[in-house]
Image (tube, rainbow, N blue to C red):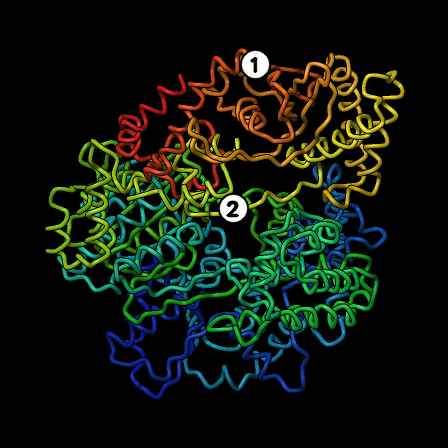
Amino acid sequence: MKLFYAHYPSLEDAFVRLVRTERRDALSRWLVVCSSSFVAGRLKNRLARELGAAANIYFMTGGALVSELDAEAPGEVLPLLPQDNLRDFLIKNLLAEPGLDRYPSSRGFVQAVKSSLRDLADSLADPDVLDEHLRTAPDAVLEQDGERLAWFNRVYRRYREREDSIPGFRSYQAAFERALGQAEHSAFLQSFSKIIFYGFYDMPGRQLELLNRVRAAYPVTVFAPYIKHPAYRFAKKFFETNWLGASGGEDAEAGRFGALGKSGGFLFSPEGSADAPGVQVVSAADAKGEVFYAAKEILRLVEKEGYRFSDIAVIARSAAPYQDELRRAFKANCIPLDASFAYALQKFPLGVFCLNLFSLAANGFDRETVQAVVSSPYFKRTEKYKWRALITRSLVSRDFSQWLDLLPQTKNYDPGLLDWLTETKRRLEALDAPQRWQKGAELALALLEDNTDQSALEGKDGEIYRAVCDKIKSLAAYEAVRKNAGAGELVRELADALAALSFNEAEAVRGGVTFTDASRARGLSFKAVFLLGLNDKSFPLITPEDPVLRDYYRYVLRDVLGYWINQSLDRADEERLLFFAAATAATDKLYALYARAGADGKAAVPSVYLAELARAANLNLQADDAPRVSGRLSERIAAAGNEFLTPKEMSYAVILHPASARKNYERAGLLSGGVSRALSAAAELSKSGALTDFDGMIQSGAEIFARENKTGFSPSALQELGQCPMKYFFDKGLRLAEPDEPLSRRELSPDRRGTAYHEILKDFYEELYQKGLTHELFDSAALEYLRRAVEKHYDKTSYRAFGIYPVVWELVLKDMEEKLSAFVLEDLRHLGPFTPAKFEIPVSCEPTDELPVRLRGIIDRVDVDEKAKTFCVADYKSSRKGTKDLASDLFKHLIFQPFVYVFIALHLKELEGYTSAGSCLLSINKGYDRRDLTPEAFEAVRGRAVRFLNLLTGMIQDGTFFLNPSDLCAYCPYAAICRRDSFKSLLRARKSAAGRSLEEARQ
């Protein structure tokens, strides 16, 4: 074996020299086995660029070589047992076998065991040898803690047996042994005049065995990444044991550390440093700021310094935290990308639909999940748009019984939706039943197919749908592990299998900027590299010890028994090597970026690797002239310069200077009709002074007034108008319907409780009045009449009408009975000479000279004193609001009922001949509470109250609907379209004549 070793840049040069000097015949076939497909592509491209062609030089990975030899071996073979949910299921069942059921087999534990089994299998460890060592070797640690390793070895032995016994599949070990057996006599390998292994600084035992088998039969040349440098501590043992021990080797290192220059030699070394002009440390407010800086600097490098996009790479330890923002930002900046992005199934709308469909029962048929399924463009039913509106109008919150009870009560009810829900529930319950896996897979696939509109699938949807269907079908293979699924097991296994699906989305623009993670970047080289995420816990990643195959066990396996397997904590050393490789991938410019805050807004700490880079390169992280990306978008845009702004950013930059905005939009070619109108609106909104059209000032409110006055103004409408004229305009003027709140299963909503109180009290007092018993009852008799009134409307089954749990309804009903019992007993005692005589009366009052508007409402109760010919209006309240002074509350708290209902009652024909004894508010929920508006108080406040009502209704006629923010804004359904956060809008409203008039009237 011939060995060359060096750091990646020098190693690549040595490889190219070898090809240039030793490959004199272009027809000579060479095989290059690379550590990754990225490295293979890099070498191939460089040979093509420098030598003009790379014909007859074949590049492949180690895994591809095993597949090639396996395929070449004679005889038919079965497919490999996949590494997906079937293997997980196999392990889960192993862990439930007697003697192996030491720990609960949660999904996380199964994944941990799977990873440890893979490491042990890759090391080619023999369970018999390990058993023998545990029995005979003197080891104080294993004497104390050897039972866990013995247990895991039993799991490993049984795992190997089950792998080889699953019908229709074969284990990877069987394929590997078949490939090993083929290696010596392989026509494929014999067709090459030179075989090279390139880029391996570490190998598991299985890969190492393949290399040893190949080099025993063929001349092999190895290009190994290694130099005597602290960054290579992770690779040292493997290099000295397996590479250097087999051959003296040639040190090909030329001291090339790219943009780091001489400082690269001092990185991770406590002694020495050197200036590195090509290295720049950039501090950004957050991850978005890092990407923003990278995008703008890439544009500058390309347009100002002549770089090609393909000369540039963006590297992060893990690509996932950056990929969405990077794709968005680079697309906006027209930067081509050469990258592949991985997304889980739930990232795709079709995936969300599939997951929601199968989780309907598990989620209790909650409103959000049902609505998500029905609203999906992939839902097959033609009635879906009607059903979506029906669900929106319904009061259902969750639980199937709520759909049964409440959906038929909904306006424009369509029984087809309930039929679909019922059928879907039946089919999901059938999936939950114990059954053969094959049968369950067929039922699940049928459920998906019957509910998916395949004509709506576009682009990637087809790939996703096929993958989901294949994953469902794969459940049938579970029968090879266990014939039947237990109750509820199939749906759980399907959910886990679907959640594990992932899909790649490539933006492979030839000549684009490379974006990848640090692992895949090993061995690559670019003129400029942007190294993102140099923060604590991001780079380096913290690698915890394997909880199953602990590091001491791994030490025994490797250093005592000779099976090549790394310790988990060795990965900390590999993190250092990954950083070194990524940093030295930049030949000219290295941009090291870190965030000052994380995604949660909390302060983030720079990485220890960044601090070490700064030390080695003589950089001051706190220098005043160090690049710093602001968290404010306006400051970031200003620092970027106009020539590199996107149209959206340019628009933002322009609008920050309103005086010159229109001119600058026109100069930038962005002044469309919509922008022009927006600028005019912005100018108006930024003005001080009188209210404008943008503040709810319409030309005339006569139409709105006429429409509302036709039916009459209720106390609640007047309250809404007094609280916020803008909200009244949205509600009554524009008729933007407020959505009904879904009903909770755990409580009775306040409005429903109030309705129940009114119904019960109406029947209670009405029966007493008809029988002449109002003043004749003992407490026990009164409570009996109350019980009858309650039972007339509600019983133990009434929970269906409210959509709450039966046990909750029992508690609610008991609570209402207790509160009503206390209320009626106190109320009967306080009636005096009055008798409740009229109940739940719809009333209205025609316009008069005094108040030229129509009033309306529903009076809860009118108490009459026939002897004195007086009446008192009573209004029930479920809770107590305001003060004892109802005259003052009309203005301060906008409680209109006591005044308005007396005003209307004075004009009712059925009360002619009676005089008013005032009104009262009767609170129920927290014990009996009565507050009165006496006749004297009514007359004293009448003039001011009428003027106030005229002021409010006059605002409608004038078209004055300004905003009036208060604590109630938190509950307003129109908050998203209100300008309450606009300082100038708020200032105009508060300083306007109308705003001051309303404020003064309420004092």
Q: Quadrant of the C terminus?
A: top left
Q: Which residue is mark 1?
A: 935
Q: Position of residue 559 (x, y in %)?
A: 60, 49
Percent position of residue 728, x then y: 43, 38
In this view, the residue in front, 1000 or 945, is 945
Residue 954 is left or right of residue 89, and the answer is left
The percent position of residue 87, horizontal first and vertical second, equals 69, 63
C-alpha gap between disc 1 and disc 2: 89 Å
User: How many numbered marks, from 0 up?
Assistant: 2
**Residue 172 visible:** no
- Mark 2, secondary structure of its residue: helix
Which-is-in-front pick, marks 1 and 2? 1
Between disc 1 and disc 2, whose residue precedes? Answer: 2
Residue 220 visible here: yes
Mark number, residue 570: 2
- Residue drawn at the location 37% of the way across and 52% of the way down: 325
Identify the amino acid type marked 2.
Asp
* Above or below, 814 relative to 505: above
Tell me the quadrant of the picture where the N terminus can be found. bottom left
In the figure, 846 relative to 421: above or below? above
- Graded by Cα atoms within 10 Å as few (under 14), some (14 to 19) or many (20 or more), the crowding at tag 1 reads some
- CB under 8 Å between callouts 1 and 2? no
In the picture, residue 848 is in which quadrant? top left
